[in-house]
Amino acid sequence: MTELAQILAARIRAHGPMSLADYMADCLLHPAHGYYTTQNPFGTAGDFITAPEMSQMFGELLGLCLAQAWADQGAPDPFTLAELGPGRGTLMADILRATKGVSGFHAAMRVVLVEASPRLRAVQGQALQRFAPVWVSAVQDLPPHPLFLIANEFFDALPIRQFERAGFGWRERLVGLSGDALAFGLGPVVPIAALDHRLSATAQGQIVEICPAAPAIMAEIATRMGPQGAALVIDYGGWQSLGDTFQAVQGHKPVDPFATPGQADLTAHVDFAALAAFAHPLAHAYTTQGALLSVLGIAQRSARLAQNLSGAALQSHLAATQRLTARDEMGTLFKVLALYPAHHPAPPGSH
Ligand code: SAH
């Protein structure tokens, strides 16, 4: 049993079963035993590999997309260039390298990173030292300037609650104990106002998920953005989620989410319809990662980079291009939600 498992089991014995969201929150961000606070999740030696860690092209193309949106809106100065959950800082470093030549962009920007993990803040600081980034703990703390924002694999790390349809109500899936082991149980049948709109299209026993932190985060992004800005949210998921998408990954393999709390990455699919609705009154565009990267010119960029590569480096570059864009790989599993004030054009390629 991990130390965190013992802490959580003691809490459940004292106070009863906890929501899946509370379980995920402790597993991911417990100050002493949380996954993001203690582990080194990224890359081949870690537990999973994200798009920016796979290829520099991801950040370059999305950075230029944001810079074009900024230029299309009259190049506001100053503006906030923000990232939610920057991991190792690779995506932001690629964005900043690619946008160096965009006239006025670097002079006008303030780089702000929203990061909960002190350990990852230190890693990001090393990658981005030259750009004097500022860290904040939540979107509420972003400065009141035009906001150009990116979030890759951030929302999938936010805790979710799960509910099972029961008659015209719902039973929450709760984390309790079976003997000494952590296990799922079901709470009593209750009405859930936030799920009323799901009653017409769910069958008995089906599971729906909600992300309790998402409404406030999206509302805050919409308020901060006001009349100027754009946000790109990239993640796996779909347009309105249905079913159990909670998963644990360790060493690039799925594992039992209750076996090693604090040592496995826990995620759930992102419900983009919910994010778009919470971001009212911003306009939105929704596409796949593969489609967006193609429109932004990944084939041309990939061919250009390939000219200077050979052998294993070339193979791995071509494999990464394929993985980022191909159907049934990240190309269609990952979606992009672009948010922008309705009187401006959508960021290039997002429609
Ligand atoms: N965007 C990066 C890393 C994704 S992993 C990439 O593409 O490689 C998720 C990131 O979100 C980590 O940096 C993690 O520490 C951060 N994070 C998770 N939950 C958070 C929260 N509630 N508030 C702020 N940051 C959070």
Image: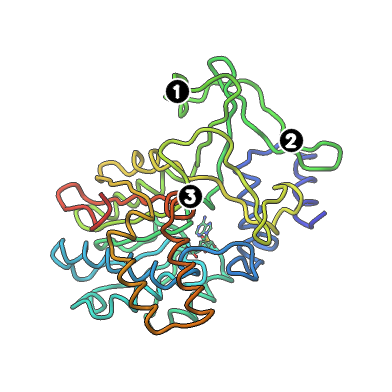
Please name the residue shown 38% across and 39% down the image. 273
- The dot on residue 188 is none
Please name the residue shown 19% across and 47% down the image. 342
- The dot on residue 328 is 3
Residue at mark 1: 196
Badges 1 and 2: C-beta atoms under 8 Å apart? no
Instruction: Return the disc, 2 or 3, that comes first in the chain's sequence.
Output: 2
The quarter of the picture where residue 292 lies is bottom left
Looking at the image, residue 206 sits to the left or right of residue 258; the answer is left
How many angstroms separate mark 1 from mark 2 (CA)?
A: 27 Å
Label 1 residue SS: helix
Image coords of residue 86 (percent x, y) = 47, 66
For badge 1, the amino acid type reads Asp
Badges 1 and 3: C-beta atoms under 8 Å apart? no
Residue at mark 2: 16
The quarter of the picture where residue 239 lies is top left
For badge 3, the amino acid type reads Asp
Residue 255 higher or lower than 313, as above or below: above
Q: Nearer the viewer, mark 2 or mark 3?
A: 3
The quarter of the picture where residue 184 lies is top right
How many angstroms separate mark 2 from mark 3 (CA)?
A: 41 Å
Label 2 residue SS: loop
Instruction: Return the disc, 1 or 2, that comes first in the chain's sequence.
Output: 2
Q: Nearer the viewer, mark 1 or mark 2?
A: 1
Q: Nearer the viewer, residue 124 or 42?
A: 42
Image coords of residue 252 (percent x, y) = 64, 60
Residue 26 higher or lower than 311, as above or below: above
| CB at disc 3 and ligand 1 closer than 8 Å | no
Q: Nearer the viewer, mark 1 or mark 3?
A: 3
Q: Residues within 10 Å of mark 2 (few under 14, many from 20)?
A: few
Residue 313 higher or lower than 182, as above or below: below
Instruction: Return the disc, 1 or 3, that comes first in the chain's sequence.
Output: 1
